[in-house]
Image: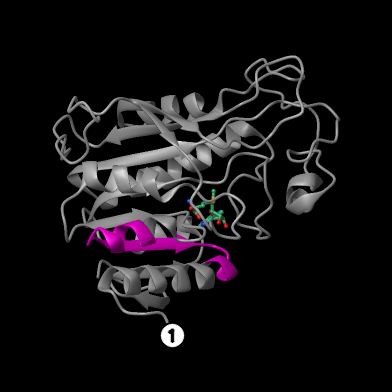
């Protein structure tokens, strides 16, 4: 499909290619302007350990995290068609000094133990952050991308029907995340008829979505309906969709269902294997082929 000097293509499921590797290395090998829409959710800073040296999210400081994402999305801008769009879901976090939450730099349980915990657990020395400050990372990433040349076109609030429970008593529990719509140029492909409000009005920028029934074992999968909306609004059938942090392959599943091609990049081979079977199952369902 869209590779010039091809990187190892391990799996092809229908029109979905899954490339295993660090996006920073793989993206430069993709052909310029070959992608219509990039839909993705990078790891959030300091939250989970994806068990790889090159993982995003384990940088020493949130400033380094933002800088690294800007570099990766600069490559995404190069591979995007001139009328293409980027749909970016990023989560926030708190600056913490000590503490042992279920997740975050100081967590003592779950899959957060390794690289993330080796990091200095003091409040990062940047942006005037103090202990327990909400870092505002989604907007910091958005502003940095804007400064790097992206046009920031919308801030969609994803309202979670079933948010992760939090045992907090001194603030409301978090139940939303941001999805930013960026474009490369002022004029871009956006099919405002593809999804409308029930009243027929233009789609609003808050989306109430639940987790997918059945789900996946990936700890941070986003709902298929979220990707479905971005794909329908931002591409035509046959277009190529990119996800440089594909995890369990939700973007590929939705792309295959909507008759789009897709290139997925994932660092962790286990997740890539998992996404292959998810996508194969999805393709079989769409074609009406009974599962073996
Ligand atoms: C938030 S998860 C994405 C989940 C995905 N949206 C889904 O629905 O399953 C981020 C993924 O990025 C992967 N990742 C981390 N650093 C990466 C890198 N440098 N290049 C490619 N993938 C990376 C992680 O292994 C993880 O699976």
Membership of 257 in magenta stretch: yes
Left or right, 223 with reference to 185? right
249 with respect to 190 (left or right): right
* Left or right of residue 11, residue 63 in this image: right
Using the image as rendered, state which of residue 77 and residue 198 is in the foreground.
198
Which residue was labeled with disc 1? Answer: 292
Looking at the picture, how far across and down is residue 275, in whole percent? Answer: 48, 67
- Quarter-of-image position of residue 204: top left
Q: Which residues are magenta?
A: 253-271
Quadrant position of residue 282: bottom left
State whether residue 109 is above or below residue 166.
Answer: below
Question: Please, what secondary structure does the residue beneath circle 1 have?
Answer: loop
Residue 210 x, y percent position in the rendering = 48, 41
Camera-side residue of 4 and 205: 205
**What residue sits 21% from the left and 26% below the top?**
199
Task: Tell me the quadrant of the picture where the C terminus can be found.
Answer: bottom left
135, above or below 74, in the image: above
Q: Residues within 10 Å of mark 1 (few under 14, many from 20)?
A: few
Tell me how the rendering is colored: one colour
Quadrant housing the N terminus = bottom left
The residue at the point 71 percent across, 24 percent down is 125
Location of residue 11 with respect to 31 vertically, above or below? below
Q: x and y percent of residue 255 in the render? A: 30, 58
């Amino acid at each position: 499909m869209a590779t010039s000097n091809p990187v190892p293509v391990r799996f092809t499921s229908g029109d979905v290619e899954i490339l295993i590797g660090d996006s920073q290395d793989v993206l430069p090998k993709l052909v310029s302007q070959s992608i219509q829409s990039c839909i993705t959710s990078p790891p959030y800073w300091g939250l989970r350990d994806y068990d790889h040296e090159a993982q995003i999210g384990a940088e020493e400081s949130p400033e380094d995290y933002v800088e690294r994402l800007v570099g990766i999305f600069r490559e995404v801008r190069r591979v995007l068609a001139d009328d293409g769009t980027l749909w970016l879901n990023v989560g926030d976090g708190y600056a913490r000094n000590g503490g042992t939450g279920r997740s975050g730099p100081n967590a003592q349980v779950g899959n957060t133990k390794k690289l993330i915990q080796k990091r200095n657990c003091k409040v990062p020395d940047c942006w005037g952050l103090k202990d327990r400050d909400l870092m505002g990372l989604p907007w910091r990433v958005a502003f940095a991308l804007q400064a790097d040349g992206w046009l920031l076109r919308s801030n969609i609030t994803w309202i979670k029907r079933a948010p992760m429970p939090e045992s907090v008593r001194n603030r409301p529990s978090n139940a939303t995340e941001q999805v930013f719509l960026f474009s490369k140029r002022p004029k871009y492909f956006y099919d405002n008829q593809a999804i409308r409000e029930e009243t027929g009005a233009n789609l609003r920028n808050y989306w109430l979505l639940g987790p997918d029934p059945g789900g996946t074992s990936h700890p941070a999968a986003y709902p298929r309906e979220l990707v479905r909306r971005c794909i329908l609004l931002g591409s035509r059938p046959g277009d190529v969709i990119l996800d440089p942090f594909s995890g369990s392959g939700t973007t590929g599943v939705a792309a295959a269902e909507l008759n789009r091609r897709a290139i997925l990049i994932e660092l962790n081979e286990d997740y890539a294997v998992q996404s292959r079977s998810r996508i194969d199952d999805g393709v079989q369902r769409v074609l009406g082929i009974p599962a073996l």
